[in-house]
Amino acid sequence: MAALTTEHPRKRVSLGRRILRAWQLYLMLLLPLAWVIIFCYWPLYGIQIAFRDYSPVHGITGSLWVGFDHFVRFLTSYQFPELLRNTVGLHLYELLIGFPAPIILALALNALRQKYFSRYVQLVAYAPNFLSVVVVVGIMVMMLSPSTGVVNQLFGAMGLPRVDFMGQSEWFQSLYVFSGVWQSAGFAAIIYLAALSSVPPELHEAARMDGASRLRRIWHIDLPSIMPIAVIMLILNIGSILNVGFEKVLLMQNPLNLGVSQVINTYVYQVGLHSDVPQYSYATAIGVFQSVVGVILLLLANWAARRIAKSGLF
């Protein structure tokens, strides 16, 4: 006859006792938690500026409540189609070129057999990430100058006409995107290289014994291993489709390319801070509109990734 054993259920420890047992960890957590509350959640109180006719004299709560007037004004503005076209077009161009670039770089570095050469290439590719946007734009201005730039001097030596790259609107998007790839692709490839390092070597050895070529092994082993990370990065990129980099666009912007370089972020800066009469409520309403659209696109992209790739952000 089998012996009967009685299992004693675990006693549930209250939250207070768990905190007392590990009070040192909770004390360390207190400072970053306070930082998040002060700098991330408390500023949300100011969102109501978008629904008021804000005046610094009357304060936030003392300003007149106008509801969705500022949102309607922006959506019906004659500038809205151009701003939306410039912002979405620039982001999609950046997504088309900039998203696969670190993946291709990571796959190429992972496939190199000479590790010393691979580390040298990694160092050269990572270095531009530590340059500020101001420095990158300054390098572009000096190299592409119509009179003293290296590129135009080379054109002149070859008998080709000089080109004002920074002053012609058709060059703005390409310069913005490819300079961004040069600056950030190497550093962005780190996350994909970390995923590739966790691939078991036995998979490559078995595929090599079966006669699989390097491209076949990349397609059937390496790519599936980084696909979940790539999907997450793609979802985050889609969620920020209306938030194109503000600093770089503003630094590259001039009256000659304003027709394609005026995006939503620079327009918010112009009407909110740089105009003769700052329109705080109008600028805040545009920012809230960007955030709401970004959240909706993030949810839709995550839903689509769950349905198609069986992987998502949440």
Image (cartoon, rainbow, N blue to C red):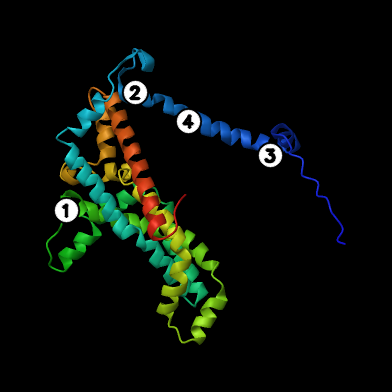
Residue bearing mark 4: 41
Q: Earlier in the sequence, mark 4 or mark 2?
A: 4
Q: CA distance from mark 1 to mark 4?
A: 41 Å
Amino acid type assigned to the residue bearing label 4 in the image: Tyr
Q: Secondary structure at mark 2?
A: helix
Q: Residue drawn at (32%, 43%), measured in percent from left and top?
A: 243
Residue bearing mark 2: 49
Q: CA distance from mark 3 to mark 4?
A: 23 Å
Residue bearing mark 3: 25
Q: Answer yes or no: do the residues labelled 2 and 1 have beta carbons within 8 Å?
A: no
Q: Which mark is residue 135?
A: none
Q: Which mark is residue 170?
A: 1
Is residue 94 depicted above or below 18 in this figure?
A: below
Q: Secondary structure at mark 1?
A: helix
- For the question of whether residue 261 can be seen, the reply is no
**Looking at the image, is mark 1 or mark 4 nearer the viewer?**
4
**Looking at the image, is mark 2 or mark 1 nearer the viewer?**
2
The picture quadrant where one finds residue 279 is top left
